[in-house]
Image (cartoon, rainbow, N blue to C red):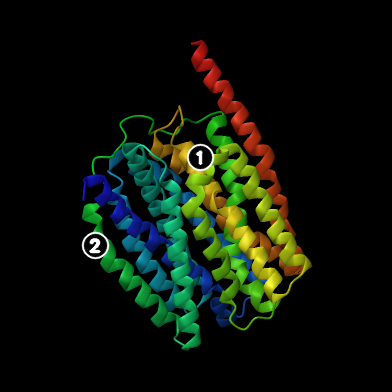
Amino acid sequence: MDSNSKHRTFLSIFFFLAGVSFSTWASRIPTIKAAFGFNEAELGTLLFAMPIASLIGLPISGILVSKFDTRVPLTISFLVHAIALTCISFANNTYTLVAAICLFAFSMRILNISVNTQALTLQKRIGRKINGTFHGLWSTGGIVGVGITTLMLALKVSITIHFIIISSLIFIITVTASPYLLKNDKSTSGNKIIVGKPDPYIFYLGVIVFFAAICEGGMFDWSGIYFKEIVHESIFTTGYLTFMAFMAMSRFVSDKIVEQIGMAKTYILSATAIMLGILLAITFPFFWTSLVGFSLVGFGAASIIPITFTLAGMSPKYSSGMAISIVTTYVIAGMLLGPPMIGYLAHGFGLRRAFIAFICVAFMIIPISRLFFSHREKLTNQQKTI
């Protein structure tokens, strides 16, 4: 096995583990909601702690990108992430729960930036698009995670034992696999955030993934509750599992789709699929129609973030690591602001009506992506003129 293949194999493990970890948390949110007796608004407030903790990591992630090879913060953040997951299960009051969730969100930000920077560096070395496949592995990990949760629920295993098992697995594999990640990938330029007028190239990409992440994060945290309270399905992980399965399958073919129709058309196709899927699920809130709707949402959400990270890695102003760090701020803000937003809307108008918000934000991806490609074309023409 050559070095690139070996690096790709072990990096794939970390993408997979990240998916397992996040879906383990997300699929147990109904359990936490019931254990603490939260209503939708209170749950929304709890989830709001995550973006705050994550945004604190923006300057810290910039320092890490400029000071270390990415495998160092990746390893440390994954270990902290595993500890935070266990702490969530041991929380016995709202204060300790919020503290554990904040640590979970903060470490998740660092590990997401690290694995994606490694992925783009490796993609450049190999010379072909592989980023979609990595994100497919993240989604596959999500499927495995929610599958394990479904099994734990069926066996009536406590959330504490469940989270300890997953955390221990993450801890052991991280320590074992981290020495085989890419080394010497620290960027020597473009590592400082330039304060002032936002760079349009990064800003447009950030807004695109912000809207996409609202949909993705909202589906992560509310799909189980939707199936439990609206569809009245006793195994409430069914909807989440379907969404994750179709997102995973789509990500494994997303690189080929992009090569066939281009990035601009892929954005439009993705946004349209999300809108149609949500519309179907809320118009006909029955088991099979909701499953089909969630499948379309999974298909639509699959390509947007991998494409945007690839484009961010081509930034003319920032290094790949710093560009991803900035764009990830928008991703995490959307992914973690989406759930509380749905919580507040559900508390005021009902969960079915709250899901209309997903249609609105998915629609916004289309005009913003058109603005981005217009700006990118202008930059290309300017470079040709020079």
Q: Position of residue 268 (x, y in %)?
A: 65, 43
- For numbered disc 2, what is the local secondary structure? helix
Q: Nearer the viewer, residue 94 or 16?
A: 16
Where residue 76 sits, quadrant-wise, is bottom left
Residue under numbered circle 2: 175
N-terminal-most mark, 2 or 1: 2
Of all residues, the one furthest to the front in this rendering is 260
Identity of the amino acid at label 2?
A: Val
The residues bearing labels 2 and 1 have C-alpha atoms spaced at a distance of 36 Å
Q: Which mark is residue 259?
A: 1
Q: Is residue 384 visible?
A: yes
Seen at 29% across and 38% down, the residue is 186
Q: Position of residue 46 (x, y in %)?
A: 57, 67
User: Above or below — where is 160 with respect to 48?
Assistant: below
Q: Which mark is residue 18?
A: none
Q: Nearer the viewer, mark 2 or mark 1?
A: 1
Identity of the amino acid at label 1?
A: Glu
Circle 1 residues within 10 Å: few <14, some 14–19, many ≥20: few
Q: Position of residue 32 (x, y in %)?
A: 54, 77
Q: Is residue 24 visible?
A: no
Answer with left or right where residue 329 lies relative to residue 224.
left
Q: Nearer the viewer, residue 187 or 262?
A: 262
